[in-house]
Image: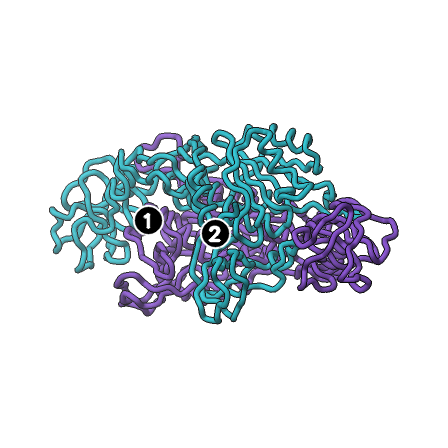
Chain colours: A purple, B cyan
Amino acid sequence: MMIPVSEARKLIDENCRGNRGEVLRLIDALDTALSADVLSPIDTPPFHQSAVDGYAFAYASWNKKAALEVIGEVQAGNMYAQAISASQAIRIFTGAPVPQGLDTVVMQEKVEVKDNTIFIKDELLVSGANVRRQGSQTKTGDAVLKKGHRMTPASISFLASLGITEVPVFAQPHIRIIVTGKELVPPGGSISGGQIFESNSFALKTALKAMGISPVSVEVVEDDEAMIMDAITRALDSDIVILTGGASVGLYDLVPSSLAKCGVKEIFHKVKQKPGKPFYFGTYGDVLVFALPGNPAAVLSCFYEYITPAIGRFTGRQYQKRLKMILAHDFQKKPGLTTFMKGKTKGNTVFILDHQESYLMNSFAHADALVELEEEREVIQKGDLVNVLMILF
Amino acid sequence: MMIPVSEARKLIDENCRGNRGEVLRLIDALDTALSADVLSPIDTPPFHQSAVDGYAFAYASWNKKAALEVIGEVQAGNMYAQAISASQAIRIFTGAPVPQGLDTVVMQEKVEVKDNTIFIKDELLVSGANVRRQGSQTKTGDAVLKKGHRMTPASISFLASLGITEVPVFAQPHIRIIVTGKELVPPGGSISGGQIFESNSFALKTALKAMGISPVSVEVVEDDEAMIMDAITRALDSDIVILTGGASVGLYDLVPSSLAKCGVKEIFHKVKQKPGKPFYFGTYGDVLVFALPGNPAAVLSCFYEYITPAIGRFTGRQYQKRLKMILAHDFQKKPGLTTFMKGKTKGNTVFILDHQESYLMNSFAHADALVELEEEREVIQKGDLVNVLMILF
C-alpha cells in the first residue's frame, strides 16, 4: 500500500494534464511562462541609430585630409531629412536616427571643432562605427522569445521595446484549500481545552503567493463527514484541491473516505516518507486532489516536494532548484523512509536544523531548503553529498 | 571624477538611512523582515498533546503484567476531565490533550484489545512516550523569531500557530520612477521617424514587483528641463527616486543639472563600469536619488547592482546571492572598466551570453545572473572563478 517517494512523484506527474493558455497584459506577466513563441512585430532598432554623441557622415566619400562642414543637428526623437553632400556632417546625439545617406558616427571627443567645421582625429574609425544598425537586435517576424520562456523583468522590458502589450502565457491554476480539524481556532481568538490555532491555511496561502498564485478559497471545516463532503464538492470546480488534516486511517480521519464518496479517484494513499506518511493523491477528471496530514511541517514538506512541481506542470514553470550539496555534519537516520529534513544552506554546504518533528515549525521558519535523505540511507558523514530542494525563491 | 564600482557601492551604502518599521497583518507579511523580535504569547503545544492514535495512561503506576481498563476517549479538540485510576487508560487520538494525571501514550498498533481492556505489547515503551509536552516548541515570552528574520511561508505558519495576527516589519520604501526622453512612445502605439518604444518603466516596475514593491508612480517626461525639474520636485516626497535617460554629460543630458537645481546633492556621477558609465547617485535629506542612463541593459544592470541592495538596506532584506562560479568558456575584455555581463548559470558554472551591448535586451531576457569582471581583468580562462550576482529570485 505504502509507495516510495519516487513512485509518488511519477504518479502525480503522469496525472498533470490541465495546462491551459491565456493572454495577459505584458506588465502583469511577471514570472509566468510563455504558452507560445512571441514574434517581433518590428525591426529593433527601428532605424540606424547613433550609439554616441558625435557627428554623422558618409564614410566612403569622406576625404580624410579635409574638414567636414556641420550643416545640421539631430537629437533622439527627431529626424534630419534634408540633403547632405560628401563634405558635410550632421551633429548627432545618442539614440538619434542616422540621416539617410550617412553610415558612420565619430564620437565628439575625437574631433577638432572650428566654427561650423570638424576635423576627425580618429585613426581607428571604420565604416559603420558607432551606429546600431536597424534590425541588429530583432527583425520583423523573428521568434524572439520561445514557448516556455520565463517572463523575467528583462524579458518584459525587451518585449515592451518591441511595442508589445500582451503576451500568451500558461494560466495559473485555480486552487481551493480545505483545512479540516475541530480543534482549530483562527489566530487572534483564544484557545482553551484541547484547541490549537489554525496555521496550515497561512502556510499554504503564503507559499502559493510566493509563486504568484492566489488561492480561490480557503475553508476550515470540522471533522464531520457531511461538512467535509460538502466542502470537497464545492472545491471540485477548481484545478487543484489541497486538503489538510484527517488524511490518515484513524477513526476520525474522514478525508480519504469523504473524497471517495465524492467520486475522487485515489491514485495513492501513504508514502514511505517522513514527515507526511499519510499523504494522499487523487484525481477527479483533470482536477488534482492532494490530501495532506494536519501536522504543519508535513503540510509544507508535501507542498514543496509534490504540489509545487505539479503547479509547475500547470504553469510551465520550474520554481525550485534541486541541488547536490555537502552535508556540514554527521547525521544518522533509521532506514525505511525517505526523510525530508528542514535545512539551511551556506554556499554549497547544507546544515540539517534541530527540531525536525512534524509538529514543530520553529526550525522550518529558519529553513531555506529541504534535505532529502533516501529510504535506505542510515549514516551520512560530514562531507557527504545529499539531495537538496531549495524552497525559497 | 569617475569612481570605481567598489567606491560607488560604499557611498550608496553610507547614505542609506531611511529604514522604518510598520505593523502588518501576518498574512500580508510574506518576504518582509521583522523590525523587532517576536515573543510567543503562549506555550506551544498549549497542552500535553498525543503524537499518535493510541491509549494514554500513567507510566509510574502501570503494572506491566496487567491489562488496563479503557474508560473513555479523547479526540483532538476535546478534553477528558473525569478521574482516572492507576489501572485505567483513555483511548486517545493524534493532537488530543493527554488527560491530567496521565503522561504516556502507547500506539494503537502496539496493544492487544480485549473487550474494554488493553494489554500493552511494547517492550521499548518509556515514560512520556508519544507525548508532545506543553511548551516543548515555545514557552510564553520566548523570543521565537528575531529582528531581521525573513518572513517565509513557514515563519508565517509558525507565528499563526502561536495565535499571532500582526507582526512588526521593516516597511517597504516608497519609490517614484521618472523616465526621460522625447523619443519614447508607450508600447501599443506606433512609432515613426526617430521614435522608439518606452520599455525602461516596464523593467523597473516588474523588477520592483519581483521584490514585492509597488512603485508609487511612473512618469514619462520629455527632455525639457522645466518638465524634468517639475517631475523631480514632485518625486522627492518618496524614499527612493529612480530616473532613466539624460544622465550623461551631453548637450541634452539634462538630468544631473536638473537634480542640482532641485537641491539634490550629488554624491557621485560616473562609475568605471560598463554598462552604466554615466550612473549618478545623489541625496535629498534621506531620499536616495538614482539617475540611470537610458539604455535598457544599463538600467537593469544598475538596478540589480546598486538599487536592489539599497532597497535591501531599507527593508532589512538581502534579495540577491553573490556567488563565485566557474566560467564555462574563455573570455576577454579591455581593462579599465568593471563590466557586468548578462550570464546564464548551470549548477556552479556560468556562461556569458552573446549580445552584451547596452542597447540590447535579447540576451538580458535569457539571463539569470550578472557576471562581474573587475576593472583590471582582461583574459579570463575557462575554469576560472568569476563573481556572479544572481538576479532572479
> Seen in the image, is B32 located left or right of residue B279?
left
Q: Does the rendering let one see residue B46? A: no
> Seen in the image, is B42 located left or right of residue B372?
left
Image location (x, y in percent) of residue B355: 63, 62
Q: Secondary structure at mark 1?
A: loop
Figure check: A137 above or below A82: below
Residue nearest the observer in this picture, B376 or B103 = B376
User: Disc 1, disc 2: CB below 8 Å?
Assistant: no
Q: Does the rendering let one see residue B50? A: yes
Write down the residue under mark 1.
Answer: A363
**Labels 1 and 2: the sequence-earlier one:** 1
Figure check: B233 above or below A91: above
Task: Give the alpha-carbon distance from disc 1 to disc 2, as whole Å.
Answer: 18 Å
The amino acid type of the residue labelled 2 equals Phe
Residue B180 lies in quadrant: top right
Viewer-side label of 1, 2: 2
x 83%, y 55%: residue: A100
Residue A325 lies in quadrant: bottom left
Write down the residue under mark 2.
Answer: A393
**Given the image, what chain letter belongs to the residue carrying mark 2?**
A
Q: Secondary structure at mark 2?
A: loop
Image location (x, y in percent) of residue B227: 68, 31
> Seen in the image, is B264 located left or right of residue A140?
left
Mark 1, residues whose alpha carbon is within 10 Å: few (<14), some, or many (≥20)? many
Image location (x, y in percent) of residue B360: 65, 56
Image location (x, y in percent) of residue B28: 48, 37
x 65%, y 52%: residue: A109
Residue nearest the observer in this picture, B391 or B86 = B391
The amino acid type of the residue labelled 1 equals Ser
x 57%, y 50%: residue: B277
